[in-house]
């Protein structure tokens, strides 16, 4: 809401120094915006999850091990990124994908190489 007000003030050439107070009515859209029930629900769920792991040492140990395994997996994938891209460019056959949308996603990927794009042109 703050950004929107600042943008509007800028649009009408009103300097920020001239605004000292913003007053609003109890319109339903403003109340709903202030309530942010989805954020409150998310925070409540997060607190419950954290509470569960804080009160269950065995669950916390399993969580830490699981987290560590995922971290090592992602770290290894990051290390091997160049090799994986090279393998995919040599071995992925877009014609066998069958779905044009999936092929489009491969070709428009940020790390798409010429060896992937040229055979599909």
Image: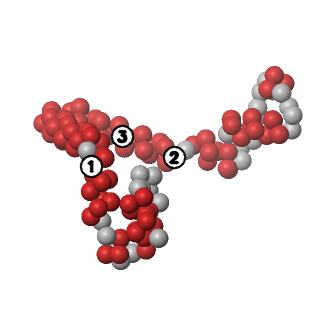
Image quadrant assignment for residue 3: top right
Q: Name the residue under label 3.
A: 46
Count of numbered circles on the image: 3
Of badges 1 and 2, the one in the foreground is 1
The x and y percentages for residue 49 are 30, 40
Q: Which of 20 and 108 is in front in this view?
A: 108
Question: Which of the numbered marks, if any, corresponds to residue 83?
Answer: 1
Please tell me whether mark 2 sits on a helix, a strand or a loop: helix
Image quadrant assignment for residue 17: top right
Residue neighbourhood size for the residue with mark 2, other residues' Cα within 10 Å, grouped as few (<14), some (14–19), many (≥20): few
Residue 89 left/right relative to 113: left
| The N terminus sits in image quarter | top right
Please tell me whether mark 1 sits on a helix, a strand or a loop: helix
Measure the C-alpha gap from mark 3 to mark 2: 14 Å
Q: Mark 2 points at which residue?
A: 37
Residue displayed at 61% across by 41% down: 34
Residue displayed at 21% across by 39% down: 72
């Amino acid at each position: 809401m703050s950004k929107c007000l600042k943008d509007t003030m800028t649009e009408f050439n009103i300097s920020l120094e001239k605004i000292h107070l913003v007053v609003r009515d109890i319109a339903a859209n403003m109340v709903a915006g202030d309530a942010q029930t989805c954020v409150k629900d998310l925070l409540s769920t997060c607190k419950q999850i954290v509470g569960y792991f804080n009160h269950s040492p065995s669950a916390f140990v399993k969580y830490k091990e699981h987290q560590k395994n995922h971290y090592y997996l992602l770290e290894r994938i990051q290390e091997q990124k160049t090799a994986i891209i090279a393998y995919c460019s040599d071995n992925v056959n877009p014609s066998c994908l069958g779905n044009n949308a999936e092929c489009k996603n491969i070709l428009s990927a940020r790390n798409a190489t010429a060896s992937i794009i040229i055979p599909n042109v």
